[in-house]
Image (cartoon, helix red, strand yellow):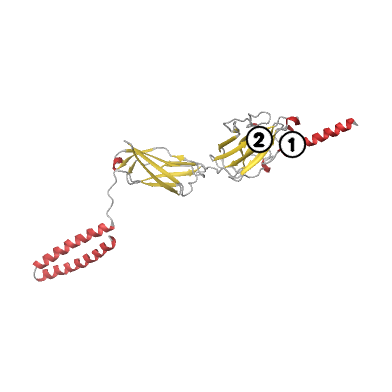
Amino acid sequence: MRKAVCAFVAVAISALGICSSASAFEGGGRSPSEAPTIVLGQHYTGQLNNHRDDANYSDDAEVAFWRLPPLSTRDVVPIDWHGAPFTREPGEFPICMTLVQGIDDFNWGSVFENRSYCSSYGPVYELAGSGTAHTEITVQEATSNSSYLEFFAYTNSENPQYYETYPYDFTVGPILHYLDAALKPVERVSATGVIRASANLSTGQPAPDGLTFNLTVTWDNGGIATYSATTSGGVATFQLALPETAYGKSATFVASHSADGNYQGVETGKLTVKVAKPKAPPPSACELAEGRALVLKRQFKRLQHNARRAIGPRKRRLSRRAKRVKRRLAATRREVASLCA
């Protein structure tokens, strides 16, 4: 009878251990196909454990999978995450995290096997003494719709007396997309000319319209000027208005875009070119009309003067020409009044 009671107690303890083991895993999926998709900016919680029988990677680790939105090469994924320390070793934190791409239910274990060593420098990240971290991971692989965050803890305990449960939580912030930018080379630029910067995504496609770029121009003796422009068709065009102190000097141009919550910051290489004195602007339509009016006025006065001194047919001929010029002068003066108002 005593043996039967002991057996019953042992079975009951075993059953409790199994229940504890099964309930200790929360959040995420135990395989890539079961992974929930992360919504950027949303707060998630989960928990892992150290129960060897609950491991989903060999007998070594319990891994939770969370699917990320589509990523491109050189995107930066910012993650704010937190974990609690070991119960028996308060100074250490058991949860590790990494980003993996291109895995499925059949090959994830072989990838994990080569990436299961935690460090503060990555690519598999551990928590520091505060238990809180802001980790920014730069995507190294090609564009992939199969990208996951893996949170895991080592499972090395077979004795229920040493079972522990490890809660964790995290938020994935807006993904910062990669930008590449370059100034279009020129040999010489007018002080009132333009400088253009091209901006592209990691795919080679033009950057979206409306991104703000700043241009900084420097030259000898502390000269500096700044301009801003927005992209259109992947190009930011800066209209210059450099002061006279820059005329004839070699100036250095650098364009930059500050990180804006959607795209990373980027700065072009330096472009050094000589600044030419601007050419005089062409006359305006008003000035041209005023010039024509002045010529016609002088012509009319000359014809009128000559007609008064002439006699006979020549006088009549000069008078007719003077009247024609007078009509043209009146029309030109109306044009001046319209253009120069």
The type of residue carrying mark 2 is: Phe
Q: Quadrant of the N terminus?
A: top right
Q: Position of residue 178 (x, y in %)?
A: 51, 41
The type of residue carrying mark 1 is: Ser
Residue at x-position 33% and y-position 43%: 189
Name the mark nearer the viewer: 1 or 2: 1
Alpha-carbon distance for marks 1 and 2? 15 Å
Q: Which mark is residue 230?
A: none
Query: Who is closer to the viewer here, 110 or 242?
Result: 242
Label 1: element kind: helix
Which residue, given by chain and number where applicable, does mark 1 sit on? 21
Residue at x-position 11% and y-position 67%: 307
Q: Which mark is residue 152?
A: 2
Q: Position of residue 99 (x, y in %)?
A: 60, 37
Q: Disc 1 vs disc 2: Cβ atoms closer than 8 Å? A: no
Q: Position of residue 36 (x, y in %)?
A: 65, 44
Decide if residue 67 is on the left or right side of residue 289: right
